[in-house]
């Protein structure tokens, strides 16, 4: 994937953590979707102008400018959120075993809805093959308790249902 949502060198991208890469990928996908929507809206507007014989009207230029201005505004929001998230992205707390690795293997993004957080954490823990190990790790995950709030118990019940 080509990253052009913000200017980054290849070295900077290679030094990104998994979480930072996920943030960058998400922002790039949002930017690409925004660009696609702009191009679709412009094409639709061009067709409407041609069908109604308004292609030489000043309305055409005004509408194009408005669509581009809206695109630039939305893109600015995406870039600002990405820069904020990358700057704020601090290492997750040490899991206490001295290896410096974080205890949460999933992205902790409090701007997500609780349903999205639930899915993110559930998918992470469901990727662990052994159901007993999965439940033990989830039970010890203090980050998930704060991150999921009342959804923590629901996910605990789901994970426990896989145990013998």
Image: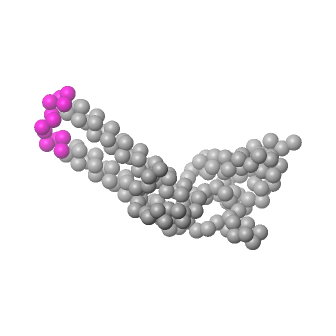
Horizontal side of residue 146 vs 25, given as left or right: right
- Residue sticking out furthest to the top: 51
Q: Nearer the viewer, residue 72 or 150?
A: 72
Q: Position of residue 159 (x, y in %)?
A: 77, 46
- Residue sticking out furthest to the bottom: 98
In the depicted structure, whether residue 50 falls above or below residue 88:
above
- Look at 72% across and 46% down and name the residue there: 126
Q: Nearer the viewer, residue 3 or 93?
A: 3
Q: Nearer the viewer, residue 133 or 73?
A: 133
Residue 12 highlighted magenta (yes or no) = no
Q: Position of residue 90 (x, y in %)?
A: 58, 68
Image quarter in which the C terminus is found: top right
Colour convention: one colour
Count of numbered circles on the image: 0
Q: Position of residue 69 (x, y in %)?
A: 28, 51
The answer to which quarter of the image holds residue 61 is top left
- Look at 17% across and 41% down and name the residue there: 59
Can residue 111 be seen at all in this image of the molecule? Answer: no
Horizontal side of residue 126 vs 35, given as left or right: right
* Magenta residues, start to end: 50-61
In the depicted structure, whether residue 78 falls above or below residue 9:
above
The answer to which quarter of the image holds residue 58 is top left
- Look at 59% across and 59% down and name the residue there: 18
Q: Nearer the viewer, residue 91 or 9?
A: 9
Can residue 18 be seen at all in this image of the molecule? Answer: yes
The answer to which quarter of the image holds residue 144 is bottom right
- Look at 40% across and 55% down and name the residue there: 4
Residue 51 highlighted magenta (yes or no) = yes
């Amino acid at each position: 994937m080509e990253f052009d949502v913000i200017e980054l060198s290849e070295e900077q991208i290679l030094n990104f953590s998994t979480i930072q890469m996920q943030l960058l990928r998400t922002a790039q996908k949002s930017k690409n979707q925004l660009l696609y929507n702009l191009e679709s809206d412009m094409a639709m507007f061009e067709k409407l102008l041609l069908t109604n014989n308004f292609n030489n009207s000043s309305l055409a230029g005004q509408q194009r400018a408005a669509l581009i201005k809206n695109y630039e505004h939305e893109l600015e929001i995406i870039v600002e959120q990405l820069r904020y998230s990358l700057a704020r992205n601090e290492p997750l707390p040490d899991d206490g075993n001295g290896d410096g690795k974080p205890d949460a293997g999933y992205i902790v993004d409090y701007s997500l809805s609780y349903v999205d957080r639930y899915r993110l954490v559930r998918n992470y823990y469901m990727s662990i093959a052994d159901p007993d190990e999965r439940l033990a790790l989830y039970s010890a995950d203090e980050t998930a308790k704060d991150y999921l709030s009342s959804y923590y118990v629901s996910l605990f019940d789901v994970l426990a249902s896989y145990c013998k």
